[in-house]
Image (spheres, rainbow, N blue to C red):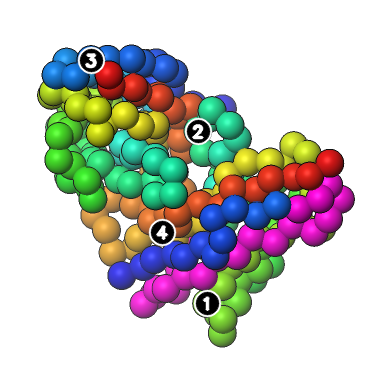
C-alpha cells in the first residue's frame, strides 16, 4: 500500500526566501508522485509529477521537487517565494494497486508569504 | 484544454434535504472521483467510477451515493443532508491511458448544511 506524509501543516516564509515543503512517501513499488497546488476557493492544479524519468522534476511557477529513494522523500522547493505562491500544497502518490487510477493525498501544507 | 466543471460553487441546504452535486468533464476520461476536503484532513475519497454505471466506494461513502449514467457526468447525492456534511466537495477525472494516473480537478462546491 502507498501513503504520503506531509511534515508541517503550515509554513510561513518571507517574500524572496526559499520555500521548502516536505513530503515523505511509503510505497512497496516504485512510486509515481505528485505535487498539487490549491489557490483560495479553487480546485487542485497539478504542479509537477515524478514518473521515474528524472529524479529532479521541474514544475510550473518555478517550483521543483527532488525524488530521493534513500530518504523516501519528495520535497518541494522554490528558490525565491512570491506573494502569489500563497496557497495550500498537497503531496500525493498514485495508488498503483487500485482498480481505477486512484491517488492518495497527504493532509496538505498551507504556505503563507510574509511581505 | 482540459476541463472539469461543477454545477455550483456555493450551495446552502437545510438538514434533511436531498442534495445533488453535478460534475461534468469534457476530456472523455474513463475515471471520475468525488472527494470532500476538510481543514487538517486533506482530501478524502467518497466514491469513484471507472466506467459508465460502474462505481466503487471510497474511504468515506456513508451518507452518500453516486450516479454515472453518461461517461462525462458523475453525480454525488446526499440522500438526507446533515450538518456534518458541510464541507468542500471536489470532483476529479483521469484517463486510463495516462500511465501515471494524474487527476484533473473541478473548482469545487462549498456546501453548507444548516
Helix, strand or loop for disc 4: strand
* Inter-mark Cα distance, 1 to 3: 46 Å
Chain to which the residue tagged by mark 3 belongs: B
Q: Nearer the viewer, residue B42 or B8?
A: B42
User: Is disc 2 in the same subunit as disc 3?
Assistant: no
**Residue B69 seen anywhere in this rendered image of the structure:** no
Chain to which the residue tagged by mark 1 belongs: A
Specify the quadrant that holds the C terminus of chain A.
top right
Query: In the image, B52: left or right of A5?
Result: left
Give the residue displayed 44% in from the left and 49% down from the top.
Answer: B40
| Residue pointed to by mark 3 | B14
Q: Compare marks 2 and 1 and give the one earlier in the sequence.
A: 2
| Residue pointed to by mark 4 | A94
Q: For residue A107, which quarter of the picture?
A: bottom left
| Residue that lies at the very extreme toward the right in this rendered image | A16
Give the residue displayed 34% in from the left and 63% down from the top.
Answer: A96
* Inter-mark Cα distance, 4 to 2: 19 Å
Question: Could you say which disc has been placed on residue A24 in the image?
Answer: none
* Inter-mark Cα distance, 3 to 4: 37 Å
Question: Could you say which disc has been placed on residue A43 in the image?
Answer: 2
Question: Could you say which disc has been placed on residue A72 in the image?
Answer: 1
Q: Which residues are magenta?
A: A13-34
* Inter-mark Cα distance, 4 to 1: 15 Å
Do the residues under discs 1 and 3 have CB atoms within 8 angstroms?
no
Amino acid at each position: 500500500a502507498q501513503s504520503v506524509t506531509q511534515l508541517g501543516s503550515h509554513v510561513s516564509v518571507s517574500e524572496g526566501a526559499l520555500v521548502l515543503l516536505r513530503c515523505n512517501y511509503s510505497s512497496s513499488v516504485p512510486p509515481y508522485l505528485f505535487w498539487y497546488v490549491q489557490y483560495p476557493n479553487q480546485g487542485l492544479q497539478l504542479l509537477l509529477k515524478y514518473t521515474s524519468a528524472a529524479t529532479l522534476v521541474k514544475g510550473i511557477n518555478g517550483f521543483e521537487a527532488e525524488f530521493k529513494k534513500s530518504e523516501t522523500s519528495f520535497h518541494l522547493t522554490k528558490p525565491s517565494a512570491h506573494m502569489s505562491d500563497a496557497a495550500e500544497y498537497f503531496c500525493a502518490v498514485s495508488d498503483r494497486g487500485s482498480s481505477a487510477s486512484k491517488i492518495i493525498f497527504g493532509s496538505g501544507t498551507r504556505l503563507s508569504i510574509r511581505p | 484544454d482540459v476541463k472539469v466543471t461543477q454545477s455550483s460553487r456555493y450551495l446552502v441546504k437545510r438538514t434533511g434535504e436531498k442534495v445533488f452535486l453535478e460534475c461534468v468533464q469534457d476530456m472523455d476520461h474513463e475515471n471520475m472521483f468525488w472527494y470532500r476536503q476538510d481543514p487538517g484532513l486533506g482530501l478524502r475519497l467518497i466514491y469513484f467510477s471507472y466506467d459508465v454505471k460502474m462505481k466503487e466506494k471510497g474511504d468515506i461513502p456513508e451518507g452518500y451515493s453516486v450516479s454515472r449514467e453518461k461517461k462525462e457526468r458523475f453525480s454525488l447525492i446526499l440522500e438526507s443532508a446533515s450538518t456534518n456534511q458541510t464541507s468542500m466537495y471536489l470532483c476529479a477525472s483521469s484517463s486510463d491511458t495516462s500511465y501515471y494516473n494524474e487527476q484533473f480537478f473541478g473548482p469545487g462546491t462549498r456546501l453548507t448544511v444548516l
